[in-house]
Amino acid sequence: MPVTIRDVARASGVHISTVSRTFSAPHLVNPETRVRVLACAEDLGYRPNRAARALITGRTHNIGLIIADIANPFFPPLIKAAESQARHRDYHVFVADTNEDPTAEEELVHALAKQVDGVLLCSPRMSNSLIEQLSREVPLVVVNRQVTGLPCVLMDVGQGARAAIEHLIGLGHHRIALLGGPRSSWTNREMRRAAGAAARAGGAELTMLGPNAPTETGGSAVAEQVRRSGVSAVLAYNDLMAIGLIEGLDALGVRVPQEVSVVGVDDIALSRLTRPKLTTVATPTAAAGRTAVDMLLQQDIESPRGARGLGAGTALGVRRTTAQVMLQTDLVIRDSTGPGPQARPARPAAASKGPDPHCPAGPGTPTAATGDAVAS
Amino acid sequence: MPVTIRDVARASGVHISTVSRTFSAPHLVNPETRVRVLACAEDLGYRPNRAARALITGRTHNIGLIIADIANPFFPPLIKAAESQARHRDYHVFVADTNEDPTAEEELVHALAKQVDGVLLCSPRMSNSLIEQLSREVPLVVVNRQVTGLPCVLMDVGQGARAAIEHLIGLGHHRIALLGGPRSSWTNREMRRAAGAAARAGGAELTMLGPNAPTETGGSAVAEQVRRSGVSAVLAYNDLMAIGLIEGLDALGVRVPQEVSVVGVDDIALSRLTRPKLTTVATPTAAAGRTAVDMLLQQDIESPRGARGLGAGTALGVRRTTAQVMLQTDLVIRDSTGPGPQARPARPAAASKGPDPHCPAGPGTPTAATGDAVAS
DNA sequence: GGTGATCCTGCAAAGGTTTGCAGTGAAGTA
DNA sequence: TACTTCACTGCAAACCTTTGCAGGATCACC
């Protein structure tokens, strides 16, 4: 039933190879023939079978996008940016969700390997060694993870965490908690490292809480623990956790930012909609999506896959770009952070009545530079 | 470089057809041979090329999932459910986003047509006739749209809208606005129809506002218009718009639910996180995802595509299931709805100081039945 | 008229897999 | 022993497309 190149050839009285060329190398065929073939193709509703084409060219014109959790609002902007960038280069994006499960992640790479020209691995939970191994099966670009020898797109969450901690210290907070995310997350490790250093430098005490699930539930679940810990400020692994934490604290009667300040990471759309509006480290997710696609396609072009024996011979091995791109982050100060205990006006019994929550950033609060990409 | 069935055959000293059978029909090959072949395959890291397999079997074991807007939190649960259901049946799901653009939608169907065994079209913005036409190219299951002759998964938003309007009327609201969504949305039409009928039946006046973009921005953009219209309650096309509207009203100094009650649709996770917590019509998105996959696969099995001339002969034409499933919705009453003007205590100048926003549902407020599927 | 160049088109192999058919050898039956 | 049955395996065609090579036609030029 499906109409093939052969049907078009028959209808227009030419050989199938001419039909093929009409689509893939129009300049090689006589204009007259070309219009006839195109007319027939249009008539019959012919569309080239990409799978068959892929079989011989070795290029599917698809790219796979593996995401830790589609329900996390952090990802949609990245997905959309990747899709639009890919579309401009005549590529399609297939998105798949792993539910934060490393096993599903591995399976998905295998499943996609032969159907796409490359895979974007976003916030992987696998081990580095497994990623390296998989990269021999299909070209990979890793987002939010540093893997030596592989092209990576990173967001400078270290810088973001530092800015956040400095912001809090500037507001007078000296006992701060870091709400950790998944253990196997590179972002998580970076944040711990940078936040720890910044706290030490500023003379603050940093309590590590976690690992936790990077969701609202994960955040609200530790509210009690946060309260007991006696900190006056929290930096959360991401916005979802920060929002969950605020909810949880609210349920315990702890007010944000009057009693506890909370900072998130990602600047998801939602962070502008909650009350209080969330202070957060903005990550350039769309730029990351675009960049990752670019890096993948660039790498793909250099080393065509499925090189035919009688190919043009440009396939000189597995030469790969291993550039790593670090994108800048930005601290966005909104209403979920306020003055720390020291800075509060010394009203005896009015501890629960803090100053205007809409307070601006304290002086000297550092803000990261603009979102330019920096290749390394 | 990629290891093929031929490599495995050579390594294990059998013909390629035996290797093929080892994977696709193990009972046909001698246990001894089988283990040897499997060992070699394992050794070489062989994985069947699904594209090549698809070329001959006509089944890719992929299904396409076309989504109006991945950034709308309504969709992730649907996507996840579809993915998990598909995985159980050894299928993979490719998700694609159309940005609410009908043209992108059509293109995407074409692009996916040959790479998947069927497509799930979620909340399409195309015309019915175009959908029917495309369904001749690839098996389609439509979600959130009724197309005669095609299998559809519907959510009973009509029932939900009715329940919402009755709830509002029960609270004493008699001037209500309906915030419409995209013009080409089936859900939108259903809601208008049912809400209009319910308002008439309850003696309330219903103002139609829209069409609007089904996003927070779309909601906040009409806040001014809502205020001017003088209604005391609003039913929004979806939660995102409802939340945007609440934000917008807040910015204008209009309080929810004290001055205006707001009801959303979808019960996205976010609706529990905003303040006030959103009263909304819960739609069974996960069930819809599962059901849609089931219907697609069922249809697929009945009419194998790309039937070979020498095939088993079960392909008796284009017999298709055209069942339509209607899933029930559920009104969830939270804090964004409160008593209407009539019901308010007659405090002269204290119009802005309404009663406890955490009021329970008024008496007689109907709630939809459980989420069972009803085939028709 | 012969030579060469230029354009266009057809031929056929290749890509990795599945599968109907036929062939092999061994075991079972008469 | 001769014949059937059975379990297993190999052969080769088919799926749809791309592409190097070669052939045919046309034309210009010497």
Image (cartoon, coloured by chain):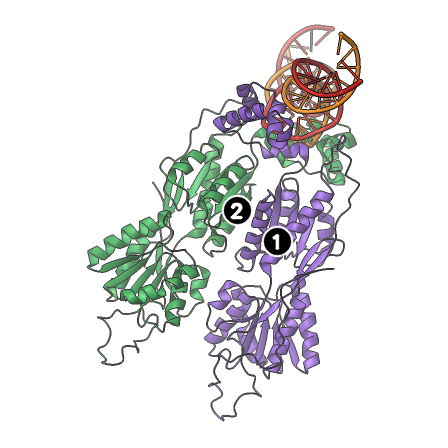
Chain colours: A green, B purple, C red, D orange
How many residues crowd around disc 2 within 10 Å: few (fewer than 14), some, or many (20 or more)?
many
State the mark number for residue A3: none
Q: Is residue A31 above or below residue A62?
A: above
Q: Is residue C28 above or below residue A107?
A: above
In what quadrant of the picture does the N terminus of chain A appear?
top right
Q: Is residue A319 above or below residue A80?
A: above
Instruction: Measuring from the top left, give residue A26's x and y in whole percent.
Output: 65, 32
Q: Which chain carries label 2?
A: A
Instruction: Measuring from the top left, give residue B156's x and y in whole percent.
Output: 66, 65
Instruction: Measuring from the top left, give residue B335's x and y in whole percent.
Output: 50, 75
Query: How far, Cα to Cα, is label 1 from label 2?
Result: 16 Å
Is residue B59 visible in the rendered structure shown here? yes
| A355 on left or right of A49 | left
In what quadrant of the picture does the C terminus of chain A appear?
top left
Is residue B139 visible in the rendered structure shown here? no
State the mark number for residue B290: 1
Q: Is residue A62 above or below residue A21?
A: below
Q: Which of A113 and A286 is in front in this view?
A: A113
Q: Nearer the viewer, residue B209 or D13?
A: D13
Q: Nearer the viewer, residue B307 or A17?
A: B307
SS for tag 2?
strand
SS for tag 1?
helix
Residue drawn at x 60%, y 61% is B284
The image quadrant of residue B178 is: bottom right
Residue beneath disc 2? A96
Residue drawn at x 58%, y 46% is B88
Given the image, on which type of amino acid does mark 2 rest? Ala
| B96 on left or right of B303 | left
Q: Which chain carries label 1?
A: B
